[in-house]
Image (tube, grey):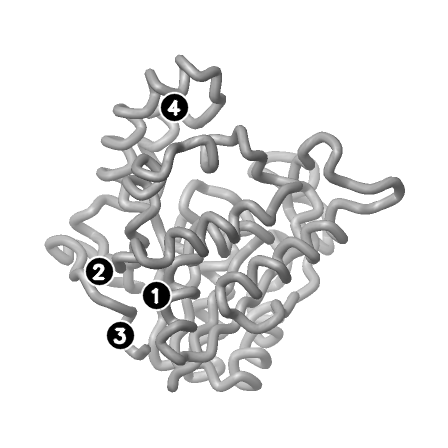
């Protein structure tokens, strides 16, 4: 049995990016640990979700704990940095936000968790954080350094297959417009994720789609049933989410991803 640690920026990122991997690794008997850099204080809450006096971060901690149960992971760890918000927002200047964190200090904080749980495999994000979010970029930087400090033998970058995403959005845009669904446009994916030729691994998570979708659903404060992610019928959801994609640090022009059952090291 190996220990998989998935390092993410905000609650709900784990379900979207690595939910299938987490569920699949757990089902195969591996230990699955989730580490959150922040509690997602600057998310946009869906109407009617928060109770009177409840803070968004409190709700998101509950949601990610529920997600972990669904995906077969242990209760989440938190590094306790503040959510930085989107790039260019005033919240980027919060001295307690993850974007402002000293990389070395944050890496030691994460490395202590990696050492404590005996991490064999660590997932982070690609070097531009999937789509340029400051906390995602910082996950990449801090994760790489923490892996060095804790001598984690395998590190992978969770990302998006840009070529597949562009093709999917081209097919879905008219359908979303017809149903009044507000979602990303094709243009939004020009710099999203990585080109397929630069990816190292593709994991088929078809058998984990039910768990992956259920983990998304519990993040009610962020993902409504009418959202881009959940409005899709099962066949469309499978087309978008049945594969999870990973790169390896420093490795490009791989010739395309190798299809594997689980990431090497698991």
Query: What is the quadrant of the C terminus in the image?
Result: bottom left
Tell which circle, 3 or 1, labels the residue nearer the N-terminal end. 1
Mark 1 vs 2: CB contact within 8 A: yes
Report whether 231 appears left or right of 208: right
Asked if labels 3 and 2 touch by Cβ distance under 8 angstroms, the answer is no
Asked if residue 265 lies left or right of residue 29, the reply is left
Tell me the residue that label 3 is attached to.
Answer: 264
Report how far apart the C-alphas of labels 4 and 3 lie in the structure.
34 Å
- Of the numbered discs in the image, which one, if any, rests on residue 185? 4
Tag 1 secondary structure: strand
Residue closest to the far top: 178
- Secondary structure of the residue carrying tag 2 is loop
Instruction: Give the vertical position of 257 relative to 264 (above or below).
Output: above
- Please name the residue shown 26% across and 57% down the image: 204
Q: Which mark is residue 244?
A: none
N-terminal-most mark, 1 or 2? 1
User: Tag 3, which secondary structure?
Assistant: loop
Where residue 85 appears, x then y in whole percent? 63, 41
Front position among marks 2 and 3? 3
Q: Which residue is mark 2?
A: 200
Q: Earlier in the sequence, mark 4 or mark 3?
A: 4
Residue at x 57%, y 73% (from the top left corner): 74
Distance from Cα at disc 4 to Cα at disc 1: 28 Å
């Amino acid at each position: 049995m190996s220990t998989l640690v998935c390092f993410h920026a905000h609650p709900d990122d784990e379900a979207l990016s690595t939910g299938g991997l987490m569920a699949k690794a757990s089902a195969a008997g591996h230990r699955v640990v989730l580490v959150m850099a922040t509690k997602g204080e600057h998310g946009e809450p869906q109407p009617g979700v928060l109770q009177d006096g409840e803070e968004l971060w409190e709700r998101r901690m509950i949601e990610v704990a529920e997600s972990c149960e669904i995906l077969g992971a242990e209760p989440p760890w938190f590094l306790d940095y503040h959510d930085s918000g989107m790039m260019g927002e005033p919240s980027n200047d919060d001295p307690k936000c993850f974007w402002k964190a000293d990389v070395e200090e944050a890496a030691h904080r994460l490395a202590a968790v990696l050492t404590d749980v005996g991490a064999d495999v660590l997932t982070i994000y690609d070097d531009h954080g999937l789509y340029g979010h400051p906390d995602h970029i910082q996950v990449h930087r801090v994760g790489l350094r923490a892996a060095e400090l804790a001598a984690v033998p395998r590190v992978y970058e969770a990302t998006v297959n840009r070529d597949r995403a562009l093709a999917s959005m081209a097919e879905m845009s008219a359908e979303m417009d017809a149903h009044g669904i507000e979602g990303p446009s094709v243009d939004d994916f020009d710099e999203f994720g990585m080109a397929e030729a630069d990816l190292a691994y593709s994991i088929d998570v078809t058998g984990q789609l039910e768990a992956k979708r259920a983990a998304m659903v519990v993040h009610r404060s962020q993902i409504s049933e009418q959202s881009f992610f959940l409005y899709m019928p099962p066949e469309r959801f499978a087309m978008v989410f049945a594969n999870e994609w990973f790169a390896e640090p420093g490795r490009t022009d791989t010739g395309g991803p190798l299809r594997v059952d689980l990431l090497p090291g698991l």
